[in-house]
Image (cartoon, rainbow, N blue to C red):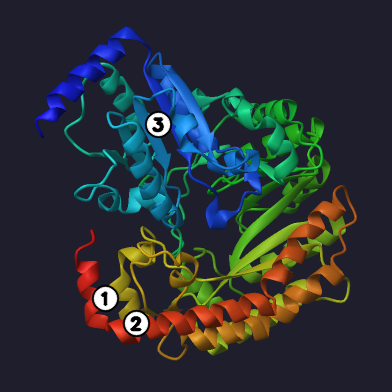
Amino acid sequence: MNRAEPRKQARRSTRAAASRPRVLLVWPGGLFSNAGSAGVPQLLHLAQAIALRVDAHVDVIDLDMERALGPVDLGPLLAGGYDVVGLSCYSSYDFLKVMALAGAVRQQLPEATIVAGGYHVSARPADLLTAGSPVDYAVVGDGEGPFARLVEAVTAGRRPLQRVLGPEAFRDPNSLMPYDWSLLSRYRSVIRTHTDQLELYLARGCPYDCSFCMERAKRETAWRPIDAEGAVEELHRADAYFDLRGKSLRIPDPLFGMRSAWRKTFLEGLARRPIRAEKVWLVMRADLIDRTDMELMARANVAVGFGLESGDPGQLRRIRKTGKLAGFLDKMLRIGEWARALNVPFGANIIVGHPGETETSMRVSARYMEKLFLGPHGTHGFLAVDPFRLYPGSPIDEDLDGWREQTGMRAHHYPWWYDGDQAFLSEWIDPSDSLSYERAEQLRYELFGPIVAEIPKRFAYTGQGREYMMRAPRREAASMGADRRARMRALHALWRDVHQQLGQAAIATTRAHRPS
């Protein structure tokens, strides 16, 4: 502790005794700079957890929405002074943004306690706590309990000795309801004019073990929903506050509706009392859904997305997508038939270039996607084709040497989140001994590009919000266009030259001084 620290603690204690503590929660901006979504439900949960434990004044800043209001100036946003500032480092793509924000906050609020949490922090807390870092504490896992206790401690003039707080599972999400949407009142108008969808969570946790997913970084895997009837009420409260006409409401739970009884109670309730949104979006597993679910989705104006990941059985087994692999791909074909019969739109996401991928597995997967989406009767679904990205905290990352040995995969620039070109570097991976990054990218466009381009022409959904639903397949077709392919080729050439010029030894030496 430096000499100034006791004086700082005394001033904090005096200020806390004189007034309510002031807490600021900051969302640094959306993944891939996408401002199409609004809601920051994770920050609203934190705010509610604080309110249950401490009499504090809490503000929420969403920098995506601030950009919609005009040029962002942190000065006025921080002018009121805050005792605790929480920064959401949702994924590794946010790491550099969060560190820059923490530095700016430290300059303006030198005595504030700065805290970071989120998936990346859960996977790599040491990244945020290096020597000289402006971040004081890193919260691992569910943040509500550790963060609320930290605010309580700061209010009393104390500081925890441990800088890594958690993990600690939050067992009862019902206690955080209802969402306090008034914390976003500043953004109410721009949410109407500048966004496509509002997000809120109805459950947390996922017991599955997909190899690529960061969910395991939060440590707790048990599925914990809010009450199903209360969940319907939360959708109506969001609609009443923001007026969701012309927009979608998205439920980005790690796993929607794991239990059939909960799922059907929720869908039945929403079918009886639909909200005004063009669509309600949710994502669930193909091996959980049944036809009754889709019948209820048709009545409730729900569209459903599936993490299909691959059309090749061998790759699905390697990805650990399901413990019941037999019939998984056939089930997805039945879902496509149900969707057409019931007029329910759906989406499916696949990952191309996952470790272990080969040219053969990519071709098998492409043939399956043609069967699923390009049949003679049109399709009610659309396909999203993502390159594999190596996320810290995923099962692959936790056993990276094992995956290298088993598959021959090679991550050319890892860890990638320390460098500014994250969108490319996170994907610069040879999937296997027999498939290089360059060849995998070439095949991604050649095999899946024509499928994605054809889907908008065959999209047969005719229900509410058809034009709204058409945006997704059109966006995906545009993302597979020549412009993106040329950009990724140029980035690959640039970074390949950088590595050749610097040499692997120099890059390895630089990384050795970063936290592992």
Residue 414 screen position, x and y as percent? 34, 70
At x 80%, y 64%, the residue is: 337
At x 60%, y 43%, the residue is: 67
The disc, 2 or 3, on the residue closer to the chain's N-terminal end is: 3
- Are the residues at dot 1 and dot 2 in contact (C-beta closer than 8 Å)? yes
Q: Nearer the viewer, mark 2 or mark 3?
A: 2
Q: Does 36 sit left or right of 408 as displayed?
A: right
Q: CA distance from mark 3 to mark 1?
A: 38 Å
Q: Is residue 321 visible?
A: yes
Label 3 residue SS: helix
Q: Quadrant of residue 485?
A: bottom right
Q: Is residue 248 visible?
A: no
Who is closer to the viewer here, 92 or 261? 92
Who is closer to the viewer here, 458 or 230? 458
The disc, 3 or 1, on the residue closer to the chain's N-terminal end is: 3
Label 1 residue SS: helix
In the rendered image, which residue does mark 2 sit on?
A: 499
Q: Does 442 sit left or right of 146 as displayed?
A: right
The N terminus: image quadrant: top left
Who is closer to the viewer here, 67 or 447? 67
The furthest residue to the top: 18
The C terminus: image quadrant: bottom left
At x 32%, y 35%, the residue is: 114
Question: What amino acid is labelled 3 in the image?
Answer: Glu
Question: What amino acid is labelled 2 in the image?
Answer: His
Label of residue 144 in the image = 3
Q: CA distance from mark 1 to mark 2?
A: 8 Å
Q: Nearer the viewer, mark 3 or mark 1?
A: 1
Q: CA distance from mark 2 to mark 3?
A: 42 Å
Label of residue 507 in the image = 1
Label 1 environment density (alpha carbons within 10 Å; few <14, some 14–19, many ≥20): some
